[in-house]
Image: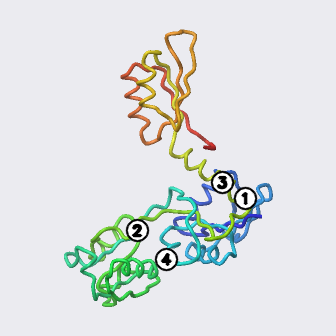
Amino acid sequence: MLRVAVPNKGSLSEAASGMLTEAGYRQRRDNRELVMVDPDNDIEFFFLRPRDIAVYVGKGTLDVGITGRDLFLDAQVEAEELLALGFGSSTFRFAGPVGEFSRADQLEGKRLATSYDGLLRDYLAERGIDAKVVRLDGAVESSVRLGVADAIADVVETGNTLKAAGMEIFGDPILKSEAVLIGRKGHAAPAGLDVLMRRLRGVIVAREYVMMDYDIRKNLVEQAAALTPGLESPTVSPLRDTDWVAVRSMVRRSQTNRVMDELYDLGARAILVSTIHACRI
């Protein structure tokens, strides 16, 4: 039975369980449940703190887990990223008092507060920056005002909390993070992992694409196909009027309205868009 770690709380929890549900797996109905077995799919889910998931997977206690890329890299365990899941995006960045810093190399000899000390130490070492890392479990943005640090490195979403603390972001992003599926490094894939990954990829594609159908004259098919190439090639079917054909193709959801407008201007009609609920690519 495949053993999978899922975040039990925080910003990743609901989205991770939602994706697994879309992939056809049972999920807990009560947030107090810590373990849930899905016998129909021969899989067992363990609901754990997101920061601990990489540790359990790295030690081989659990087969795979869903966590943030930032938390995974910070844990510094024997695990590897298997699949980016497309939700829970955030950016790990430096921030300091307004007007004091503009580049990372200005942090030489400074004190840096963070909740991701492993990740930050690796970043500084790779760039030859000698700075003191101060590990804090939370409220990192208060550390400068309290005299504990000169600057901070933290996960930034909107930046509003930093502004309220009189701080600003500077330098290049340290890391762009999102939810990822991780597995133990250097070991054979456990039974059932290929099915799990295939299903998750199907959910990702179904969320990113829609199915577009339209009718167009035969002599315009090549131009229309250039607008809707699909993943491999669009499906073209004959109509009763032999001068026209029906075309079906997958189109990125974010480009739907632009593509519809361009198809209409080209001469396509009966342009319909439908949601993809599930797929296997």
Q: Position of residue 118 (x, y in %)?
A: 46, 81
What's under tag 2, amino acid-wise? Leu
Q: From the viewer's perspective, is residue 219 above or below residue 97?
A: above
Element at label 1? loop
At label 1, counting other C-alpha atoms closer than 10 Å, the crowd grade (few under 14, some 14-19, many 20 or more) is some
Which one is earlier in the sequence, the residue at label 3 or at label 1? 3
Element at label 3? helix
Q: Position of residue 128 (x, y in %)?
A: 32, 81
* Residue under numbered circle 3: 21
* Residue under numbered circle 4: 74
Where on the picture, by quarter, is residue 149? bottom left
- Left or right of 16: which side holds 214? left
At label 2, counting other C-alpha atoms closer than 10 Å, the crowd grade (few under 14, some 14-19, many 20 or more) is some
Which one is earlier in the sequence, the residue at label 4 or at label 2? 4
Q: Quadrant of the C terminus?
A: top right
Q: Residue at x 74, y 61 (%)?
A: 191
Q: Residue at x 57, y 20 (%)?
A: 237
* Residue under numbered circle 1: 192
Q: CA distance from mark 4 to mark 2?
A: 11 Å
